[in-house]
Image (cartoon, rainbow, N blue to C red):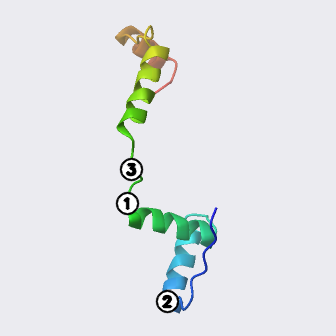
Amino acid sequence: MATMTIKKLPDDLYARLKASAERHRRSINAEAIVCLQRGLGPVPVDPDDLLAGFRSVRERTQNLYVTDADLDAARRLGRP
């Protein structure tokens, strides 16, 4: 992983970053990474990898069916 140093960071921006990190119970470094990730947008997804993941889940769960009776029984046991 790369290391980055930010020079001449305005005090008010640092204070906002620090307050946000405290609210989210993260280090200032972790909060800066989250802010950068959000600011730069989502990571591009390879459609072929995404479809392969869907197919894998479908294969593993092909015989898994939940009926209304199953759901009602779970609710009676206190499960939402």
Q: Secondary structure at mark 1?
A: loop
Amino acid type of the residue tagged 3 in the rendering: Pro
Residue at 44% over, 7% down: 63
Snapshot quadrant of residue 2: bottom right
Determine whether 4 is above or below 48 in the image: below
Q: How many marks?
A: 3
Is residue 61 toward the left or the right of residue 3 in the image?
left
Amino acid type of the residue tagged 1 in the rendering: Gly
Question: Is residue 38 at least partly visible in the picture?
Answer: yes
Which residue is disc 2 drawn over? 12
Which residue is disc 1 drawn over? 41
Position of the N terminus, as image quadrant, is bottom right
Snapshot quadrant of residue 29: bottom right
Which residue is disc 3 drawn over? 44
| Residues at discs 3 and 2 in contact (Cβ within 8 Å) | no
Amino acid type of the residue tagged 2 in the rendering: Asp
Crowd class of label 2 (few under 14; some 14 to 19; many from 20; radius 10 Å): few
CA–CA distance in space, label 3 to label 2 = 32 Å
Residue at 61% over, 73% down: 28
Residue at 47% over, 17% down: 74
Whole-percent x, y for residue 27 in the image: 64, 68
CA–CA distance in space, label 1 to label 3 = 9 Å
